[in-house]
Image: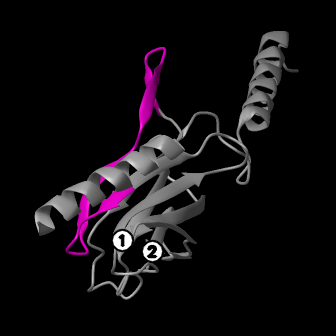
Amino acid sequence: MRSPLKLSLSLAAVVASAALVAAAPSAGARRAGPPWISIEYPANPLDPATRGAYLLVHAFHHQTPMESTVRGTAEGLVGGERKSIALRFESTGRTGVYALRKQWDDDGVWSLVISAGQGDGTPAQALVELAADGGISSVRVPTTRQREWTIPRAITAQEVEQSLQSRATRTAQAKR
């Protein structure tokens, strides 16, 4: 015959296990907390999955690579005229890593606005400024403080305009 204490401990273990299973996120569930984004440039030309890519986008939840919705636009100032091109990203076969091939003109001044996130939460965004030689001159992920955390914030239209205008002015001055 079992003792009541052993039965009670066994029942407690079953209840605790069931609670852990119920609390664990399912594979498709959205995780709490903000996403993060990083840009890799140049892409590895020796890797068949990234060969020919201009840059790679890495999407994270905290420090863990995650499948993500990655979107972006190439924002340009060409001959004094504003242009905006929706970008297409390709999966590389690695979790959370997406390849971007060049889809904008060589003329003018360009910035890329790239977003990575899941669901309806605020995505992480990177502002990638392209150099006159076709490379990358800077990458910024705007952040804000929320209690003790540094979290990504949205890039404003004013930040994109300022990025383009300041580089267009420097380019025009350099040509004089």
Q: Mark 1 and mark 2 in contact (Cβ < 8 Å)? A: yes
Residue type at mark 2: give it.
Answer: Ala
Label 1 sits on residue:
55
- Identify the image quadrant of the C terminus: bottom left
Residue occupying image coordinates x 43% and y 33%: 143
SS class, disc 1: strand
Residue occupying image coordinates x 55% and y 54%: 116
Residue occupying image coordinates x 62% and y 40%: 122
Q: Which residue is most to the right?
A: 1
- Measuring from the top left, give residue 152's x and y in whole percent: 48, 37
Is residue 57 in view from this perspective?
yes
Q: Which mark is residue 113?
A: none
Q: How is the image coloured?
A: one colour
Q: Is residue 18 left or right of residue 144?
A: right
Q: Is residue 37 left or right of residue 108?
A: right
Span highlighted in magenta in the image? 128-151
